[in-house]
């Protein structure tokens, strides 16, 4: 079973100017003469971590990580203005051009996977391959599964805890109820709701591996949640079913889709639908993995994907 490559440090970090208030944190590691790969973190609202460099053989890959606008080390943290999906795609192009890269492998999971597909559909000639983990298609039904009717049937206890923190919950539109809290002025209520909202996210992401713990809630936490809700409120700044409708643009690109059958945040249906839209893609279903990239079965599959691409410039047949 494959494991993460050893820890490594970036050979360069910088802040990318975007022509707006946003400055985007970018780092490079690995082999500058290797295969360029850009890692897209999930969220939208999280950020990159040092272990994200370790999915790639540092002798064979030129590894590029960046924190999406207002995430991680990018500045200003939590800024919503000028922070849309199209802005993130434009930032990726700025990075590619700034680094003088012709084509790159695009690697992303969950929201990062959706962003990878959207970028590739807009810039197909700049993508030499795609690795998509934990497929999220940013459809209304995907949002409903997470925040209306779906995962709440699997974890009703935590769902009820979240609902109970809201003074005026709307089960038909929880998003509106959450926005009313986090754009309101009651810090005590925001703290109480934030704890249960973050616990809900952790539970659906970790599944059976979830262990409840006390969470530290800060002003930065509120900004992070507002960013997540803002993307959901605007339906991720794309049209309904946009990703699936434009998959025909990706027929020439080698693709590996990897999905855990025990993913309670992004259920298997999304992975199957994406593969149906991309029948040439290599489709890997992991029986024991859930949503997170750190599961040993998922790590094995992701490192195998990047090793395979480094070896052949493509992927194998569907399994």
Image (cartoon, grey):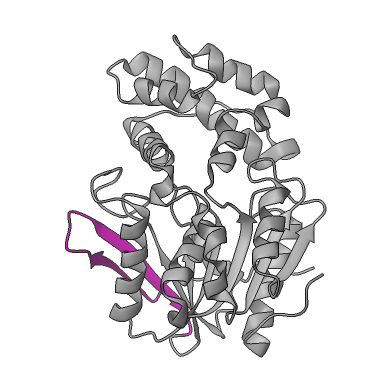
Residue positioned most to the top: 167
The picture quadrant where one finds residue 102 is bottom left
Magenta stretch mostly in which secondary structure? Answer: strand
- The picture places residue 313, in percent across and down from the top left corner, at 62, 87
Name the spot of residue 50 as percent of width and height, x first. Answer: 49, 61
In this rendering, the answer to whether 295 lies above or below 54 is above
In the picture, measured across the screen, residue 45 lies left or right of residue 83, that is right
Percent across and percent down for residue 155 are 70, 26
Determine the image quadrant of residue 254. Answer: bottom right
Q: Is residue 306 magenta?
A: no
Q: Which residues are magenta?
A: 10-31
In this rendering, would 307 be left or right of 41? right
Left or right, residue 234 beside residue 140? left
Give the quadrant of the N terminus: bottom right
Q: Position of residue 143 (x, y in %)?
A: 54, 38
Count numbered badges in the picture: 0
User: Vertical placement of 43 versus 174: above or below?
Assistant: below
Could you tell me which residue is drawn at 32 percent across and 62 percent down? 25
Is 21 within the magenta? yes
Q: Quadrant of residue 107?
A: bottom right
What residue sits 64% from the left and 22% below the top?
A: 158
Please give the name of the residue rendered at 44% of the width and 48% of the height, measured from the top-left corner: 44
Q: Is any atom of residue 60 visible in this view?
A: yes
Q: Nearer the viewer, residue 120 or 132?
A: 120
């Amino acid at each position: 079973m494959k494991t993460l490559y050893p820890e490594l440090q970036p050979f360069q970090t910088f802040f990318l100017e975007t022509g707006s208030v946003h400055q985007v944190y970018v780092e490079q590691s690995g082999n500058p003469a290797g295969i360029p790969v850009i890692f897209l973190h999930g969220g939208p609202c999280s950020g990159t971590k040092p272990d994200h460099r370790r999915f790639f053989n540092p002798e064979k890959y030129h590894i590029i990580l960046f924190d999406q606008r207002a995430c991680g080390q990018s500045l200003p943290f939590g800024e919503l203005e000028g922070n849309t999906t199209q802005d993130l795609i434009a930032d990726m192009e700025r990075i590619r051009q700034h680094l003088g890269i012709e084509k790159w492998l695009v690697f992303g999971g969950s929201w990062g996977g959706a962003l990878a597909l959207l970028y590739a559909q807009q810039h197909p000639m700049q993508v030499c391959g795609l690795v998509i983990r934990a497929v999220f298609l940013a459809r209304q039904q995907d949002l409903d599964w997470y925040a209306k009717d779906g995962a709440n049937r699997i974890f009703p206890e935590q769902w009820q805890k979240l609902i109970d923190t809201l003074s005026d919950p709307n089960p038909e539109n929880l998003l509106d109820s959450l926005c009313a809290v986090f754009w309101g002025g009651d810090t005590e209520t925001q703290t109480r709701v934030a704890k249960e909202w973050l616990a809900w996210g952790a539970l659906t992401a970790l599944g059976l591996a979830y262990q409840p713990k006390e969470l530290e809630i800060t002003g930065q936490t509120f900004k992070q949640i507002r960013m997540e809700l803002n993307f959901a409120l605007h339906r991720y700044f794309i049209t309904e079913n946009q990703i699936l409708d434009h998959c025909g643009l990706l027929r020439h690109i080698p693709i590996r889709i990897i999905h855990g059958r025990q993913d309670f945040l992004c259920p298997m249906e999304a992975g199957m639908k994406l593969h149906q839209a991309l029948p040439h893609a290599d489709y890997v279903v992991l029986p024991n993995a859930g949503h997170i990239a750190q599961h040993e079965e998922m790590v094995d599959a992701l490192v195998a994907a990047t090793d395979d691409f480094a070896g052949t410039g493509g992927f194998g047949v569907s399994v």
